[in-house]
Image (cartoon, helix red, strand yellow):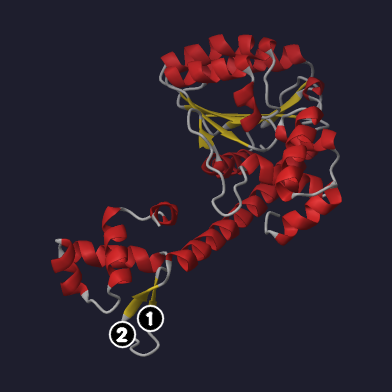
């Protein structure tokens, strides 16, 4: 039962109270204090924690009496709430992506490389790099970065290093998001580890919003076409757009895992977040190539991972795998 209690997220006092109540459901606060050598305040705090997790419920015979639910039911309830929270966050991310896409489209017809009051359209890699160098030298507090696509090019990493290094030496907080697949690219992983060894913070996520850089929460740089960054970028100071991009970054950051920390698998299904996202993408009708682009991996990797999932599902076809995944609640 210990693994199950760990999954329920109980601290030491709450676990002790929960175990004691499972052994003697009718014991009151005084009995729990005496049995566990805890203060009344500690016991009541633990009871509040258990109630928040829905691990206690009122007795139907004595409404004033709280009884523990079984660990199996408690785990099912908590997993259900986590799934609902993930769905809510996913909807928020989709809304944020749509807002960002609309904002970029509205400014896409700006005259190339000519700044207006709040926005500038940058055409060509040279123009983008020159602008980023100016912004990197001017940032004073924080830089938020989303770097989708898995492995980053060596040219991009080499261009970023002196700018990142100078910013960190000035005390600027660098928060960077990579895709989980970047952990398997030696050059990108080495760069991310170098950043964390300095003062940077790096997290990874199975899928990411489009590429973006936000400087001091006042200026944002995003690609005009996320599918082809060579077409150029939009640099904007528009408060509404910048605030939407910051909110999108923060929601993604909450769901991401720090570099150096293994992403836990779902206790109920044994799926990693990447495997679950792959199933969702393919079930939505995307091709292997499109799903791979979303996850920052190759189509070959998609096929390899899907073959492993089919084996676990004992499915002979992807159609059958989709049906069985849905029946098991994997989708």
* C-beta proximity under 8 Å, tags 1 and 2: yes
Q: Is residue 117 left or right of residue 50?
A: right
Q: Which mark is residue 64?
A: 2
Tag 1 secondary structure: strand
Give the x, y percent position of residue 215: 55, 27
Give the x, y percent position of residue 144: 55, 30
Task: Look at 63% across and 25% down and name the residue there.
Answer: 182
Rendered image quadrant of residue 208 = top right
Front position in the image: 195 or 224: 195
Task: Look at 68% across and 21% down and name the residue there.
Answer: 151
Residue extending farthest bottom: 61
Against 94, residue 256 (above or below) is above
1 or 2: tag closer to the N-terminus:
1
Give the x, y percent position of residue 113: 76, 19
Task: Look at 74% across and 46% down and name the residue there.
Answer: 279
Q: CA distance from mark 1 to mark 2?
A: 7 Å
Tag 2 secondary structure: loop
- Quarter of the image with the N terminus in it: bottom left
Which class describes the residues within 10 Å of circle 1: few (<14), some (14-19), or many (20+)? Answer: few
Against 158, residue 141 (above or below) is below
Front position in the image: 88 or 62: 62
């Amino acid at each position: 039962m210990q693994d199950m209690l760990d999954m329920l997220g109980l601290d030491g006092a709450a676990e002790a109270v929960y175990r004691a109540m499972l052994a003697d459901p009718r014991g009151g606060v005084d009995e729990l204090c005496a049995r566990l050598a805890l203060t009344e305040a500690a016991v009541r705090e633990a009871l509040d924690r258990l109630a928040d997790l829905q691990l206690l419920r009122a007795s139907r015979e004595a409404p004033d009496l709280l009884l523990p639910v079984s660990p199996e039911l408690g785990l099912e309830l908590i997993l259900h709430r986590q799934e609902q929270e993930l769905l809510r966050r996913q909807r928020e991310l989709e809304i944020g992506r749509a807002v960002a896409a609309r904002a970029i489209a509205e400014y896409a017809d700006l005259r190339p490389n000519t700044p207006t009051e709040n926005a500038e359209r940058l055409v060509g890699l040279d123009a983008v790099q020159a602008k980023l160098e100016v912004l990197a030298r001017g940032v004073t507090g924080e830089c938020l970065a989303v770097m989708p696509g898995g492995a980053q090019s060596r040219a991009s990493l080499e261009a970023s290093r002196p700018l990142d290094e100078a910013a960190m030496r000035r005390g600027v907080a660098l928060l960077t998001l990579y895709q989980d697949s970047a952990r398997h690219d030696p050059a990108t992983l080495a760069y991310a580890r170098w950043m964390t060894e300095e003062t940077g913070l790096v997290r990874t996520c199975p899928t990411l919003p489009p590429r973006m850089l936000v400087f001091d929460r006042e200026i944002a740089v995003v690609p005009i076409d996320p599918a082809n960054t060579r077409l150029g970028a939009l640099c904007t100071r528009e408060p509404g757009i910048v605030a939407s991009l910051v909110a999108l970054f923060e929601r993604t950051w909450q769901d991401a895992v720090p570099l150096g920390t293994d992403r836990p698998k779902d206790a109920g299904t044994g799926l990693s977040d990447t495997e679950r996202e792959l199933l969702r993408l393919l079930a939505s009708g995307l091709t292997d190539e499109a799903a791979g682009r979303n996850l920052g991996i190759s189509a070959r990797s998609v096929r390899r991972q899907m073959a492993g999932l089919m084996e676990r599902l004992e499915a002979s076809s992807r159609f059958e795998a989709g049906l069985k995944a849905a029946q098991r609640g994997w989708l």
